[in-house]
Image (cartoon, rainbow, N blue to C red):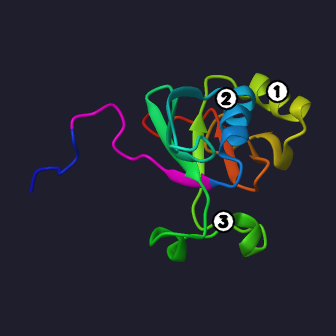
Amino acid sequence: MSSPAAKVPSTVIPGMRYRDCLAAIEWLCTTLGFEKQAVYMSADGIRVDHAQLTFGNGMIMLGSEGKEGEYAKYAAMPDELGGREVRSVSLIVTDCVPVYEQAKSIGAQIVFDLEEKPYGGKAFTCRDPEGYLWHVGEYNPWA
């Protein structure tokens, strides 16, 4: 069977919801180096209906959290799960040190400190302001 994957730059795109999605977008861009590709606001300008942030050839999709709608019954925020995650996102960077220093200077909660990993490169893990975990490392899983 041939691969069902589309011929696009990134075929796996995590999605997440934030209570203050605009603040999360700014934090992710300032702290971890994401870039805004698209931000679509609700008609009233209060909620983020859909946003796309890029990181190299990777992407995440974001939206404002809400308890209404069909999707809401399948989703939870980290604080509703005692700070636990049911998935994780890894960012592959060329040099962890400046990203780590930026995260610390902004006051990100460092969950796992910067260290050399036995499988290669340095890595650290931090939480964003709404509790999601971000693993940042130099390890190239494609190598």
Quadrant of residue 27 within the rendered picture: top right
Earlier residue among tags 2 and 1: 2
Residue 94, percent across and down? 61, 23
What's the distance in space between the residues labelled 3 and 1, CA to CA?
23 Å
Residue 96, percent across and down? 72, 29
- Within 10 Å of disc 1 (Cα), the crowding (few <14, some 14-19, many 20+) is some
Q: Which amino acid lies under the numbered mark 3 shown in the image of this protein?
A: Glu
Earlier residue among tags 2 and 3: 2
The residue tagged 1 is 102
Q: Which residues are magenta?
A: 7-17
Secondary element at image label 1: helix
Main SS, magenta residues: loop
Q: Nearer the viewer, residue 59 or 75?
A: 75
**Quadrant of the image containing the C terminus:** top left
Name above or below for residue 106 compared with residue 5: above
> Mark 3 touching mark 1, by CB under 8 A?
no
Asked whether residue 16 is drawn in magenta, I would say yes
Secondary element at image label 3: loop
* Residue 8 visible somewhere in the drawing: yes
Residue 85, percent across and down? 66, 65
Earlier residue among tags 3 and 1: 3
Mark 2 or mark 1: which is in front?
2
Q: Which amino acid lies under the numbered mark 2 shown in the image of this protein?
A: Cys
Q: Which amino acid lies under the numbered mark 1 shown in the image of this protein?
A: Gln
* Residue 122 visible somewhere in the drawing: no
